[in-house]
Image (tube, helix red, strand yellow):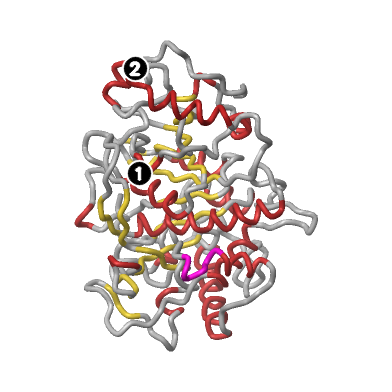
Amino acid sequence: MRRLLPATLSAAMAFSVLAAAPTDRPEQAQRGLQQASVATAADTTTAQPRVVVSPIDSGINPYHEAFDVDVPAVDEHVLAEFGIDEEHILHISDDYDADLAAGVYADVEEHELYWFAGTNILAWSVNFGDRPFLPDDSGDTHGTGVTGAVLAANPDAIVLFVEGMTDTGVSADAERYAFTHPGVDIVTTSYGFFTSAPLGALAGSYEGVVEMGKLHFGASANDPTLAPSDGTSGPWWAIGIAGFGEGEDGGGGKETFSGTAPDFVADWTQDLPYCDTCTEGTESVSGTSFATPRSAGVASAVLLEARRAAGHLGGVTDGLLVTSDDGGISNWQLRRALEEGAAVPPQVDRAGLTEVPVNSIAPYAQVGWGLITADPEQAVVENTLAALSGQTFKDAATCDFMTHYMTLRFAAWDANPLSDSFGQTNAVENTSGYLPC
């Protein structure tokens, strides 16, 4: 995973109403049974608005306490929507090895979707290896940290985790699964080359965003190369994220070792679950790998609140993230609102060791539209919701700069033979759906 800071780089980058869990499960699975009974208690409720974020990564550790929830957002209605029956519900305990020995994973299969009972995690895999869904024994716990970053920003989100790593890299089938799954609203990707390269975009990302109406958050490189030219963060239909030193672990500056000219910046260093089968503890990890899913989590919080207000059930409907009597909200409208709602980073006298203080005259030249953060003091969720109602927060200089930036980005990707938009004329006449300010 090239989006990790080099110092922490790892080796690889129902339909049925839930009945009470079977009584013949081994004693080791008591946590799963107890959590399943909690979920069952909510099964008779009416359907509720939900939001689904899909990280594509290396593996997930559902045993960590950070992923436990008392009343999962995954209820009978979500299980029915995603076609998950009792045979595809994994009742896990606190001990992976005991579960493995007891046969909890005996019947799981690649290319099928499962739910870890007692969590908000659905999981699908293109390549199990020796440990279904979990990080392999090389210590590549990257996917666990990425998932933790999403749920730390929005604990109410449902994660559809796609284990997409193969011996040759990330599977295009895994990318297409996440980007084109009708139940997924937001895809977050934290991998790519070690530096930006003007190659093609991720498989299915254009279809998912432009044709189906999703959002894609892509990590810029962990170096100062241009984010707009990168295959993950660069396409005009993707939302590119670079790093910012936020909170106690940061000094309040733009991270030097992250992409130049991003759409947004987000928290570079976070304390996250980062282990293969442990049940507690966090690790401080850095990189755009984690800034990006944090951004996706914040965006999902905005989307969930908008859906609750509108009473929208399910996922993207007729190309709209939210449907309502007023016509609804598209992915382009939510992106435009996020551009307005992102916080302008505060000025500091001295930033962290690897950070550069943000220029007070032209902050957009360093941080794009601004900082996407879950910090309630910055009110990004509230301001983005206000922007959906027409309120504006950014000045004309920011708007002019970022509009020019987007025009150049359109021109570059529409002229790239490897781009899904090759041959389009968005730089001259925007027909993509993207909404300039």
Which quadrant would the C terminus be assigned to in this image?
A: bottom right
Q: Is residue 384 found inside the magenta-colored segment of the image?
A: no
- The residue closer to the viewer here, 310 or 392, is 310
The residue sitting at 63% across, 48% down in the picture is 212
**Residue 259 in which image quadrant:** bottom left
Q: Mark 1: few, some, or many residues within 10 Å (few <14, many ≥20)?
A: many
Question: Can you name the residue that lies furthest to the bottom here?
Answer: 361
Type of amino acid under label 1: Gly
Magenta region, residue range: 376-381
Which x, y percent locates residue 146? 37, 49
Residue 432 in the image: state x and y as whole percent.
Answer: 64, 62
Q: Residue at x 42, y 63 (%)?
A: 241
Query: Farthest residue in the top direction?
Result: 24
Residue 45 or residue 300, whichever sits in front: 45
Mark 1: secondary structure: helix
* Residue at mark 2: 27
